[in-house]
Image (cartoon, grey):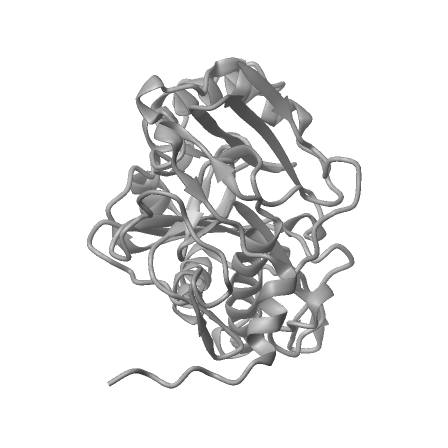
Amino acid sequence: MEARSHPQPPPGSPRRRARDLGIVVGSAATGPLNAITDVPGVRVGHTTVRRQPDVHSGVTAVVPDLVSPRTPLPAGVFTGNGYGKLIGTTQLAELGTLETPVLLTSTLSAFRVADAVVGWMLQRPGCEKVLSLNPVVGECNDGLLSDIRSRPVHAEHVRAALDSASGGPVAEGCVGAGTGTVALGFKSGIGTASRTPALAGRSFTAGVLVQANFGGTLRVLGRTLTPRSVCVGAEGPVPAADTGSCMIVVATDAPLDARQLTRVARRAVFALARTGAAYSHGSGDYAVAFGTRPGGTPVTDAELGPLFESVLDGVEEAVLNSLLAATTTTGFGGRTVPALSADLLLDALASPPIPPSH
């Protein structure tokens, strides 16, 4: 089985992101990397786990530098639809504090990942006397393209993602927890984006990372697009529009409390509607938002508007980036899910809309 860590994008010519195609969401400026790692003190690591042709899975770690049970960070969580296994959510909601990195993985591997991150945290300096710990692990079901029952993600993969986590550019698409995911009829994966809103005259950064795996029909710049309309097709069954999930992680250096961060998390889930999400019965749609700057001069609720808008725009762009960075994948059972070709997407956006049939 092949397992690879991806703290930085792999070498070679990267696939074009939404902004490279002239698809600009919102008016706020991005951070230098247009990634969650633009937030100071936030790192990302991936371990990709593949065994051709049946296993396409992995784990992604979002690691705030300061987080530990001794120095928890303010955080909030919001559930758009709760068909999911977001481990650690009750204490996160009750206390409004994050004690560990946020890990993302495959549904049936979530419990192994939680155990592994607990072991990793207990070995951190300052945690020698820790007797209680609340790991936060989100998941999406990658069973369409990966042999999910084999539970291929193990402790060594989790530790590799955590240990290799770094700042700088974030690998997107078919890496880490996004290796086997599918969204809106296309191959998807990990996507990220950032914005730098001004709140009451002070500049802050909000970064988002998505693990996109949800159903619905893709919308880009107001146009509805399907694999057929952009001239790609899937071989074999594709996910039904009423299935799928999305995990969203939001980080900000704005000095917010847990209640305000919960409000931020709500906007992150709301943003999925812009991309065409179905929010169906079988979808686990969650957002975890955390602040990297406990204390400080607080931002008032009345000043949060630009941050809310930044998160809405960032999540929409991150989903598009997750699609554009992904590659066509053939996986478990010989099923193939097509990627969203940048050139074909631009052609579709430039062509006249197809009128609805009657």
- Tell how many labels: 0
Residue 153 sits in quarter: top left
Task: Report if residue 146 is visible in the image.
Answer: yes
Q: Is residue 283 above or below residue 171?
A: below
Q: Which residue lies furthest to the left in this view?
A: 281
Q: Position of residue 306 (x, y in %)?
A: 58, 76
Q: Where is residue 284 in the image (x, y as percent from the top left)?
A: 30, 48
Task: Report if residue 206 is visible in the image.
Answer: no
- Considering depth in this image, is 219 or 266 the residue closer to the camera? 219
| Image quadrant where one finds the C terminus | bottom left
- Considering depth in this image, is 255 or 9 the residue closer to the camera? 9
Q: Position of residue 283 (x, y in %)?
A: 28, 51
Q: Is residue 158 left or right of residue 199?
A: left
Q: In this view, does 299 lie above or below 6?
A: below
Q: In this view, does 204 lie to the left or right of 277?
A: right
Q: Which residue is drawn at 39% across and 44% down?
A: 235
Q: Is residue 232 above or below residue 270?
A: above
Q: Residue at x 24, y 58 (%)?
A: 280
Q: Residue at x 35, y 29 (%)?
A: 333
Q: In this view, does 343 lie to the left or right of 33?
A: left
Q: In this view, does 314 lie to the left or right of 261?
A: right
Q: Where is residue 147 in the image (x, y as percent from the top left)?
A: 36, 25
